[in-house]
Image: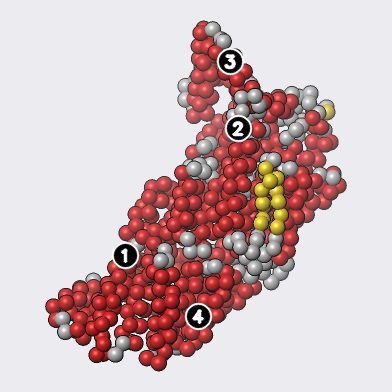
């Protein structure tokens, strides 16, 4: 901190004043602070307290509202372990002590949201806003009252905040029609009152609703299309004009997420946001900028905003604003925290009390930084950089401690996926144990973690050819899909694709093809390019398994070009493997094409982070060498063939794919038989038989 800056001078004065205090005064101050903290803790936990000190403690509105504000902040972040922040017993005791406290109903509303109790959440939200303007002693008295009731300006602000909070609640429970009605009413009221901040927050809620439109609503007007991009651009512009930090941050993340999901539609979208006096790109989609790069830039911009907001909240200007907010004689026009009145856009939690706390913006940005880390991990993982995805996921877990439980779950799921694909079954199982330890007994209650565990169970079962167990995992995944929640679109696509792959492995090719064709139609309807490409890839696999290599080639060739154009390396490398395997199945006349393709792309395939791709590439390379080499020249390439097969067996063993390991050792034994090496042949054959008996 610059020593001569405003914050630097404030720190110096505070430090100097404490040092100049006599020892007795300093000890008295520290003892008073300690007694105050212990008494508040005991009063909340129901322990023994000094009744006089307790009465003195809770007679101060600032002390109570500080405690309530911290509880609301923790509940709205929905971070890990939020259920221990304010237990139901403590809520009951707080209600008995201060039954007319308006924020009491809001705390119960947040607790109902956490428990997914819709009737209770709506009831307590209505009660909170019904009584929040009726008393002079409203939380931290930030309103001018007339005759015991709030002023007209405060009443209008309260109505707009109530409508936005209601829309946020309806959106949380995927009630699209009710959310749209509440947003429309909020917009109408804000237009009548010329409230630009409320209009901007209503626009943010609208973009969230459009972004989370479920597949079933895609035929209507609610679907993620160019309309969403237009609204996000408008939101970014308004956030900059109004200088609302958390809206600028939300626009940054939402546009980065849109660019990740729809790289073609978002091409050319350029905008700028002055995040805390520093010019930063909100959505800079240049021709040479990939979505992971944009997500990383968004994270950097958000970090700058978070640090600045923390410094701003500690400045003397912010403290004086808080003093003015506590002054009951302060008029509505004197409030300097009006931008914090409305619900924060991070997940759109209802935050009506944030007008009473100058740290609300800083808290929101700290929470949104966790979302930015999760988005960066998702982006790098989507584009095939699994190790970078792992780095950002670990960053979220170790650095963004105030992230929501949803963002924490996303990071844990990314780490499980990385371990399964890049390190093998044993590492994935170890990661699963660590996640179970982190989330505790309620680990299966989090949908994202449950889906990651079920996918892991599916992969283990498929590796052991236990199709019944794999079917159970897919069935459980499909039961988790909420048809009314757009956030479950990805889960719907993934579970359907895994079901089709399972039918393919079981030999039910017609059912698998029908499922995948329907899936492609659904993905095209919601314009989800990545889901469509993954479905086409599975369809090519189905044709290959059904001994139709020509059809598989017809699917894989254009898919490889499309994936290369979008930079989606996981899809591209899988398509390359399908192409080579299809040429090999077409016979010796096309085997040379497979060998040429493997010679050209082998470095790309074996440098992939995925063990599955590496194993598949080594196996295809060995088969291509066998198919294109005359028998009398086999000894010249035998060492390369055996080495490739051993590498493929090692990668497959780490994945737990015993069927492929058995195939590799069978071909190794065949290669040694051609060479006449009986001992090596018998050794490989023994391994193959041992795997077959398992």
Q: Kindly identify which residue carries mark 2.
A: 68
Mark nearer the N terminus (3 vs 2): 3
Q: Secondary structure at mark 2?
A: helix
Q: Residues within 10 Å of mark 3 (few under 14, many from 20)?
A: few
Proximity of marks 2 and 4: CB atoms separated by less than 8 Å: no
Tag shown at residue 654? 1
Asked which quadrant contains residue 501, the reply is bottom left
Mark nearer the N terminus (2 vs 1): 2
Please state the horizontal and vertical placement of residue 500, each as a whole percent of the image.
47, 76
Q: Kindly identify which residue carries mark 4.
A: 556
Give the farthest residue toward the bottom: 589
Mark nearer the N terminus (1 vs 4): 4
Distance between mark 4 and mark 3 Cα atoms = 72 Å
Q: Kindly identify which residue carries mark 3.
A: 16
Mark nearer the N terminus (4 vs 3): 3
Proximity of marks 1 and 3: CB atoms separated by less than 8 Å: no
Q: Is residue 117 left or right of residue 569?
A: right
Q: Nearer the viewer, residue 200 or 160?
A: 200
Distance between mark 1 and mark 4 Cα atoms = 27 Å
User: Can I make out residue 545 in this image?
Assistant: no
Q: Nearer the viewer, residue 416 or 180?
A: 416
Q: Residues within 10 Å of mark 1 (few under 14, many from 20)?
A: many
Mark 1 or mark 3, whichever is nearer to me: 3
Q: Secondary structure at mark 3?
A: helix
Quarter placement of the C terminus: bottom left
User: Can I make out residue 296 in this image?
Assistant: yes
Quarter placement of the N terminus: top right
Q: Is residue 613 left or right of residue 329?
A: left
């Amino acid at each position: 901190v610059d020593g001569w800056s405003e914050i630097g001078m404030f720190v110096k004065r505070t430090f100097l004043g404490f040092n100049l205090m006599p020892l007795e005064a300093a000890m008295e101050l520290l003892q008073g602070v300690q007694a105050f903290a212990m008494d508040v803790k005991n009063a909340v936990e129901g322990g023994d307290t000094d009744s006089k000190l307790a009465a003195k403690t809770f007679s101060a509105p600032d002390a109570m509202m500080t405690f309530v504000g911290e509880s609301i902040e923790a509940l709205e972040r929905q971070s890990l372990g939020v259920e221990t922040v304010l237990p139901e017993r403590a809520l009951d005791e707080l209600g008995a002590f201060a039954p007319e406290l308006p924020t009491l109903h809001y705390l119960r509303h947040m607790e109902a949201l956490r428990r997914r109790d819709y009737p209770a959440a709506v009831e307590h939200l209505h009660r909170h806003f019904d009584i929040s303007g009726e008393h002079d002693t409203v939380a931290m008295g930030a309103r001018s009252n007339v005759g015991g009731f709030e002023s007209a300006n405060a009443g209008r602000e309260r109505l707009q905040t109530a409508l936005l909070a209601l829309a946020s609640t309806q959106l949380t429970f995927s009630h699209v029609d009710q959310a749209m009605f509440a947003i429309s009413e909020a917009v109408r009221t804000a237009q009548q009152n010329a409230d630009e901040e409320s209009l901007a927050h209503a626009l943010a809620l609208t973009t969230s609703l459009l972004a989370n439109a479920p597949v079933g609503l895609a035929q209507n007007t609610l679907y993620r299309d160019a309309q969403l991009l237009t609204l996000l651009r408008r939101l970014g512009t308004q956030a900059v004009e109004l200088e609302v930090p958390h809206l600028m941050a939300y626009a940054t993340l939402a546009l980065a997420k849109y660019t990740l999901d729809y790289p073609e539609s978002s091409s050319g979208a350029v905008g700028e946001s002055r995040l805390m006096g520093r010019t930063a790109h909100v959505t800079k989609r240049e021709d040479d900028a990939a979505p992971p790069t944009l997500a990383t830039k968004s994270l950097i911009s958000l970090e700058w905003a978070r640090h600045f907001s923390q410094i701003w909240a500690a400045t003397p200007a912010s403290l004086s604003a808080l003093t003015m907010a506590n002054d009951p004689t302060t008029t509505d026009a004197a409030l300097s925290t009006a931008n914090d009145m409305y619900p924060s856009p991070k997940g759109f939690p209802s935050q009506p009390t944030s007008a009473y706390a100058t740290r609300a913006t800083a808290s929101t940005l700290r929470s949104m930084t966790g979302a930015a880390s999760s988005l960066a991990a998702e982006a790098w993982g989507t584009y095939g950089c699994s190790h970078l995805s792992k780095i950002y996921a670990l960053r979220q877990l170790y650095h963004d401690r105030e992230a929501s439980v949803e963002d924490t779950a996303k990071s844990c799921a990314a780490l499980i996926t990385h371990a399964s694909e890049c390190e093998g079954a044993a590492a994935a199982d170890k990661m699963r144990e660590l996640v179970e330890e982190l989330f505790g007994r309620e680990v299966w209650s989090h949908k994202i973690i449950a889906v990651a565990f079920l996918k892991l169970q599916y992969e283990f079962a498929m590796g052991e050819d236990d199709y019944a167990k794999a079917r159970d995992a897919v069935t459980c995944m499909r039961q988790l899909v909420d048809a009314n929640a757009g956030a479950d679109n990805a889960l719907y696509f993934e579970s359907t694709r895994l079901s089709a792959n399972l039918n393919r492995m079981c030999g039910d090719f017609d059912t698998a093809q029908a499922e995948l064709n329907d899936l492609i139609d659904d993905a095209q309807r919601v314009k989800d390019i990545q889901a469509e490409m993954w479905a086409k890839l599975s369809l090519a696999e189905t044709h290959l398994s059904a001994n139709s290599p020509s059809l598989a080639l017809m699917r894989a060739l254009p898919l490889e070009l499309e994936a290369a154009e979008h930079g989606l390396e996981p899809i591209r490398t899988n398509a390359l493997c399908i192409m080579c395997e299809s040429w090999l199945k077409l016979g010796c006349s096309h085997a040379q094409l497979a060998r040429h393709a493997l010679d050209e792309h082998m470095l790309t395939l074996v440098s992939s982070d995925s063990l599955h791709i590496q194993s598949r590439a080594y196996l295809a390379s060995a088969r291509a060498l066998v198919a294109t080499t005359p028998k009398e020249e086999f000894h010249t390439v035998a060492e390369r063939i055996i080495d490739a097969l051993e590498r493929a067996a090692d990668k497959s063993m780490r994945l737990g794919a015993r069927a492929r390991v058995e195939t590799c050792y069978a071909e190794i034994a065949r290669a040694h038989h051609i060479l006449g090496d009986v001992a090596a042949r018998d050794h490989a054959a023994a391994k193959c038989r041992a795997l077959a008996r398992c």
